[in-house]
Image (cartoon, rainbow, N blue to C red):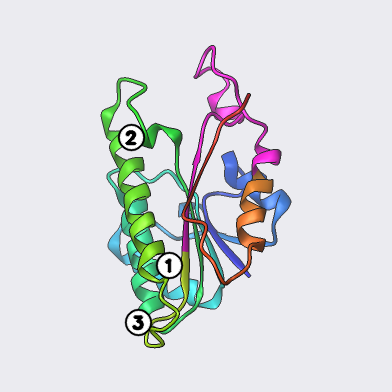
């Protein structure tokens, strides 16, 4: 079972909803992930799922805080699972005028990598097996970015879902730490 963030009526969450049997949480259904209370509720809800797709673009490092909430909740409850963090290729370099977005995505990347590597010891039976992947993506061809990224090649979001599916379907005996995907 998959739990994701985002409004399934908009953006990439809408594309995810076409490709996966996934339940979503966002402000549209009463989960304000910008608040600690909302993130805490979400963390508890995530215990009913084996896969979490961290998709929402939450400002002020809230996407990182949500990752932390879910991860810590899973550890405290000895819950195995997979966390897929949808990031951005802007985590690797500065592209625009907003340095905050790049810093937030870089923080998500770094934290995701640390968590994924933290659980790689099968000898440690005291820890749950939590796989954690960071997927850096370039421009997706979505309605809300039609007028942005002029001159940038945009990726088909339906095809990008194949990457996410590959991570979800990968053997539980290894962790895909990081993938970076761009359109040609």
Q: Give the CA distance from mark 3 to mark 2.
A: 30 Å
The reply, left or right, for residue 156 in relation to residue 75 is: right
Observer-side mark, 1 or 2, equals 2
- Measuring from the top left, give residue 131's x and y in whole percent: 48, 66
Q: Read off the residue under disc 2.
A: 101
Q: Please report whichever mark, 3 or 2, sits nearer to the chain's N-terminal start.
A: 3
> In this orientation, which residue lies closer to the viewer: 3 or 96?
96
Checking the image for residue 167, the label placed there is: none
Q: Give the CA distance from mark 3 to mark 1.
A: 15 Å
In the rendered image, the vertical position of residue 153 relative to residue 171, given as above or below: above
- Measuring from the top left, give residue 105's x and y in whole percent: 36, 41
- Measuring from the top left, give residue 28's x and y in whole percent: 51, 52
Checking the image for residue 42, the label placed there is: 1
**Is the Cβ of the residue at disc 1 closer than 8 Å to that at disc 2?**
no
Range of magenta residues: 132-160
Observer-side mark, 3 or 1, equals 3
**Is the Cβ of the residue at disc 3 closer than 8 Å to that at disc 2?**
no
> In this orientation, which residue lies closer to the viewer: 181 or 36?
181
> In this orientation, which residue lies closer to the viewer: 134 or 100?
134
The reply, left or right, for residue 69 in relation to residue 4 is: left
Q: Read off the residue under disc 3.
A: 76
Q: Give the CA distance from mark 1 to mark 2.
A: 23 Å
Quarter of the image with the N terminus in it: bottom right
Q: Is residue 50 magenta?
A: no
- Measuring from the top left, give residue 15's x and y in whole percent: 66, 44
Q: Residue furthest top?
A: 151
Residue at x 54% of width, y 58% of height:
4
């Amino acid at each position: 079972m998959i739990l994701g963030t985002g409004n399934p009526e908009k953006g990439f969450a809408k594309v995810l909803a076409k490709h996966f049997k996934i339940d979503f949480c966002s402000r549209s259904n009463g989960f304000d992930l910008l608040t600690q209370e909302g993130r805490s509720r979400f963390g508890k809800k995530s215990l009913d799922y084996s896969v979490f797709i961290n998709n929402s673009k939450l400002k002020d490092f809230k996407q990182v805080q949500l990752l932390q909430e879910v991860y810590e909740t899973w550890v405290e409850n000895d819950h195995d699972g997979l966390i897929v963090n949808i990031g951005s290729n802007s985590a690797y370099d500065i592209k625009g005028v907003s340095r905050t977005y790049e810093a937030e995505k870089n923080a998500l990347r770094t934290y995701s990598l640390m968590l994924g590597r933290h659980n790689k010891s099968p000898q440690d039976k005291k820890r749950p097996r939590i796989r954690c992947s960071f997927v850096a993506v370039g421009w997706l061809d979505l309605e809300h970015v039609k007028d942005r990224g002029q001159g940038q090649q945009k990726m088909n979001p339906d095809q990008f879902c194949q990457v996410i599916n590959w991570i979800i379907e990968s053997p539980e005996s290894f962790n895909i730490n990081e993938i970076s995907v761009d359109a040609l």
